[in-house]
Every structure is written in C-alpha cells, then in structure tokens.
Image (spheres, grey):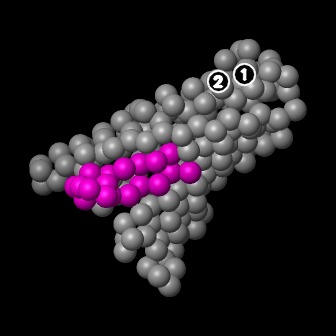
Amino acid sequence: MKIWSTEHVFSYPWETVIKAAMRKYPNPMNPNVVGVDVLDRGLDAGGRLHSHRLLSTEWGLPGIVRAILGTNQTQTYVKEHSIVDPEEKKMELCSTNITLTNLISVDERLVYRPHPDNPEITILTQEAIITVKGVSLSSYLEGMMARRMSANARKGWDAIEWIIQNSERERTSL
C-alpha cells in the first residue's frame, strides 16, 4: 500500500474554483478521461449538493506494467461521489476505480476549502491510497502509480485554471 498526498493553492475564490471543478471534464489537459456520466445528483436537507458520476478513462499503460499485471486492458471506470457544502464552503470528492479491482485499488479524496487567512484563494488537499494486489513487484508498481498521480494532479490543476480562464473570456465577450 502506498499513500500519496499533496496540496495546491488556487488564486481564485472558492466559488470560482468549485464551478470549474464541477466542469473539469472534458479538457485538453486530461484527454484520458473520455466520458463522464452523472448517475445521480441532488440536494440533501442541509442544502448540500451530492453528485455520483461514472468516469470512463483510457490509460496507456507501459508494456512492463501490462506484463506484470497480466492484462492488456486500458479502458477503466471510476466511480466518483462529491459533496458541495455552500454553507461551510467545502467540496469533498471521493473516487475509486471499479475496473481491475482484483489487481489495483486507488481510493482518492480531494477537499477544496477557502484559505483560512485569505478567502480570495482556495486550498485543495488531495490524497490517495494505492494498493496493488496479488502480483510480484507490487511495491514498485504502487510507487510508479504514485508518481503518475502526481503528474496527473498537476494536469488537473492546470485544467481547472484553464476552465476558469476560458469562462472569464466567455463572460467578457458577452
């Protein structure tokens, strides 16, 4: 098992970042996410928005990883549950893979909150638990996946920035 975590600061207010995060896919920074289906979305009694989505992804795994795992499967599915609490100004998103679970599990948690000292910026904390099961070199593969998660996290941050900037341009031209 490998635990990976990071933190990122967006130079935008929480509301702006959350709107962009909810519209994150598709985007040119993460072309591996090829589909997003909303399975359920609704408000609870406390006014929090709950969303359940299914992400379809296409990952090109290196040949050595496919050989170690004994699979050529590159299309995977991820279930995602998010809760947006506008009163507390917190968005929590949890995701887990539902493909290849007999070999790999990746449980990821993201939390977006306003910075405690400056409400005009937003802090994202991101963590994942990566477990490779039943294969040799599992520790090596977990480390490789953690490095890939770091690279993909940066792409995700860039995607949110891109969405915000394009949204602002669209608004200006109207």
Q: Is residue 71 left or right of residue 129?
A: right
Give the labeled residue for mark 1: 140
Query: Along the line of sight, which residue is nearer the eye, 26 or 102?
Result: 102
Residues at marks 2 and 1, CA–CA distance in whole angstroms:
6 Å
Give the labeled residue for mark 2: 144
Q: Is residue 81 left or right of residue 112?
A: right
Residue 37 colored magenta? no
**Quadrant in which the N terminus appears:** top right
Q: What amino acid does circle 2 point to?
A: Met
Q: Is residue 108 visible?
A: yes
**Quadrant in which the C terminus appears:** bottom left
Residue 125 colored magenta? yes
Q: Is residue 72 visible?
A: no
Q: Is residue 98 left or right of residue 55?
A: right
Where residue 73 appears, as percent x and y from the top left, is 74, 30
Say what secondary structure mark 2 lies in.
helix
Residue density around tag 1, few if under 14, some if 14–19, many if 20 or more, within 10 Å: few
- The residue most toward the front is 117
Where residue 108 appears, as percent x and y from the top left, is 60, 47
Q: Main secondary structure of the magenta part?
A: strand
Say what secondary structure mark 1 lies in.
helix
Where residue 116 appears, as percent x and y from the top left, is 31, 58
* Snapshot quadrant of residue 61: top right
- The residue most toward the bottom is 45
Q: Which residues are magenta?
A: 109-126
Q: Is residue 71 above or below residue 33?
A: above
Where residue 69 appears, as percent x and y from the top left, is 80, 25
- The residue most toward the left is 173
